[in-house]
Image (cartoon, grey):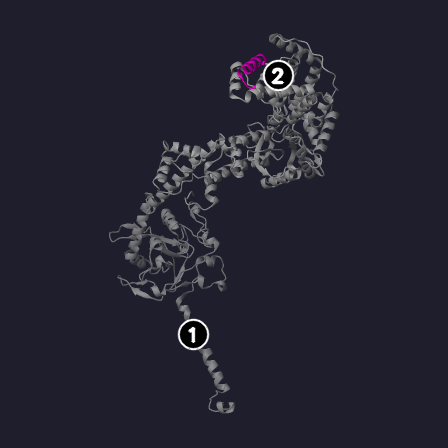
Amino acid sequence: MSGRDRDKYRSHPSGHKKRLKKQAAEENLKKMKGSFLKYIDKTLPKNLKDNNTDTTSITMENIQVKSPTLQITESGKDQEYLEISEVQTYSYFATESSINFSLEDKESNILDTNSLCKDEKLSMIDPATWTDNNMTQHIRAEVVKFGPYQVKDFDFPYSVIDGTKRKFSTFYYTRKLINCEIIERHWLVYSKSCDRVFCFCCKLFSSSGPQQSLLSTIGTNNWKCLSENLKSHERSSLHLKSVQIWMELKLRISENSTIDKAHQSAIEKEKQHWKNVMIRIIAAIQYLAKLNDAFRGSSDVVNTENNWKFIGIIEMMGKFDPTIMEHLCRIKNKETRIHYLGHDIQNELIELMATEVKTNILRKIKLAKYYAIIMDCTPDISRHEQLSLVIRIVDMNSENEGTDPEIKEYFMDFVNIISSTGLNLSEVLLQKLTEYQIPVGNCRAQCYDNGANMAGQYKGVQARLLNQNPRAFFMPCAAHRLNLVIGDAVKSSTRAIHFFGTIERIYTIFAASTGRWMIFTKHCHRWTVKRWSETRWESRHDSIKSVRFQVKEIIEALDEVSETTNDSLIKSETHSLVSEISKYEFLISLCVWYTVLKEVNIVSKSIQGPNTNLDIYATLLNALIKFMGEYRETGFNQAKLEAKELAESLEIETEFKVPRYQKKKSYLNMKSIKKRFDQTSYYNNIFGFLYKIGKLRTSTQEDIRKNCKDLAMFLKSSDEKDISECDLFDELMICRNFVTESETPLQVLGTLKKCNGAFPNLSVAIRIMLTIPITSAGAERSFSKLKLIKNYLRSTMSQDRLSGLVTLAIEKELAETVNYDIIIEHFAAKKSRKVNFK
């Protein structure tokens, strides 16, 4: 069928009919326009009127929906109810001023519930803001605890109802009985934000139902029928049930006996139990770390053999402490698999405690600003090279105004290094400073031993650090240099080498056998013979001291060894030693070296303390050099007299044997000794005028100004300056008049601290001077802890555990101040735990 044939049976309306149809549809729409308004209350809330709200911006969310259904109550009066199928959610978005209104004694009780319900605010005194979205169980309990708030001193707004202006009155807060008694309606509350009244208890506790009143949902503002509606609501079963729930909850809150109280109490009790357990575990770890003791043996299980000291301490505490007793009983009865006594938990707690100690140290370093670096390396028992990092500061104790400044050297870390070259060590150092967030530019000194990788002029650590910070002044370890001076003096003399070889042979022959050692102790009661070492600074003095005052006893012990032994080699060795010791030349060497090493040892020990500064070191060094010069002139005669007394007591001839001719070697002279301490002399010239500020009274202003200028130039790098030479000069001119000549720089700094920052440049100059370390003994002391903690029985200890234990052992004073609660919080937050500590 063609298109024309298909369309010939169709009816097509004309254009006129189409226009009539369109016109009829438009008229129908006009008739329906406004038909929905009979369901809408056109009266705006008062707050919208007061705020001059644009009516064009009012949406359906701002409009109050009327209930179209009326039901007859028992009293026969009209009461507004909502059918379940027609319940509309009342949502009134008040402005900020209508919610956060001021109230003299209630303003603090307005809760900001943004954390509970996003983008909503809830007021404890405005029931219009209570919705299912923001009304949690906790907030409901808080509202009940606060109680209903009835607005009284307020000018209630008028509403037009059936052509008559009406408003709410405080008269409705009371109810008059038939016997004329007045009863308070405590449950009735008025909302300023929407000009409606609500039932306090029904709004909080009423459940949805066919008889749900407007007082329990969106509130009512039908002031014409409010009296009858309130009476009807009071008699409803839903209201009576809500009142009962309200009173029961209020009673439980007042008696602190809510439904979940027992459950919460059990949770809190369990939480406190585990906190107490952790506190005791942390205390046990801290105790063992402080004493450098081992923690575990071959077992980590409670009530088994070889579980060693940590578990042993816990078991011992379980005999007296109720908390640990209960904890061990749970483990024994298999009531819990969580015990927190394993080595992994130990490592975590050690790391957390060490981190807390380091945090306190870093806080002090950043407050002090200027610091010095002390580093040294040593192999441990596992033959791993360990780098010790120590930082020296002047702690001003700014948090406590009544305390004096102190010089502190803090141990920071042990780092296992693969290569000990200057490049690798400097990279490790810079990496650690970056990790600690300590600026390299604030470093004012660095102190290492005299090894080429550390003190190298071009490729050493000190040279590489100076390239990044020209004010990181290098100070070679003074104690190490003294040791090198003695070592060079020994190596430059054949007789000295022979003498110290004899001292070593005496130690070896007695220490190699327990029987010979018993013979030695039978004759020598005061000191035992000791081996001298190249690196231990006072070992030479200790090894000579035992021989110097026990020569006769040692000879007698050697004679007894020779008589009692059957070994021909031992007999030959003892005869050789007796013959060597009995020489007058050996006795003179013994007296000379003991006197020299005694004075060197006094200076070496004095400068190893952390409080030693350039002033003390310069004084001691000058005194030692002066003693060496005088002893070089008169010491030999004095040594001959002492040796003669020894020889007479031993019945030894006091004559020298004529030696065969030998080529003379070059001996160490005083100039070479002074040359080793040129760096110290340079720093003395720069900072020397600050050693005794009180003595500047006798100095001329030109000299003081020149010293200030030199120091300012010394502490300058590019455009950065630490002090101003003019300000420093002015401060010195005043300070020299009230500082005594006997006051040390540290005491002067304490005096300046009490001046409330009146001498900032002088304070900075003294702080930098005191920051410069004299020796690297701080790093050497950490090696002693390393050998105590990582011994041959604990050679497989991990690096993190080693660093943590050494930190707790060295910085035990700071470790004692660690807050256990903070450690437990960090322990709980580190990862998900099976026990709730929060």
Q: Earlier in the sequence, mark 2 or mark 1?
A: 1
Q: Cα distance, mark 2 to mark 1? A: 134 Å
Magenta stretch contains residue 126: no
Residue 500 point in image, percent of width and height: 64, 20
Whether tag 2 and tag 1 are in contact, CB under 8 A, the answer is no
Q: Is residue 226 above or below residue 740?
A: below
Q: Is residue 215 above or below residue 770?
A: below
Residue 825 point in image, percent of width and height: 46, 41
Dominant secondary structure, magenta: helix
In which quadrant of the rendered view does residue 837 lie?
Answer: top left
Residue 10 point in image, percent of width and height: 47, 89
Mark 2: which amino acid? Ser
Q: Which mark is residue 126?
A: none
Q: In the rendered image, which residue does mark 1 sit on?
A: 32
Q: Tell which tag, 2 or 1, sits nearer the viewer.
A: 2
Secondary structure of the residue carrying tag 2 is: helix
**Label 1: few (<14), some (14–19) or many (≥20) C-alpha neighbours in 10 Å:** few
Q: Is residue 298 left or right of residue 438?
A: left
Question: Looking at this rendering, what residue extends furthest in the left direction?
Answer: 179
Q: Is residue 149 above or below residue 514?
A: below
Q: Is residue 303 left or right of residue 497?
A: left
In depth, the one of 79 and 673 nearer the eye is 673
Q: Which mark is residue 576?
A: 2
Mark 1: which amino acid? Met
Secondary structure of the residue carrying tag 1 is: helix
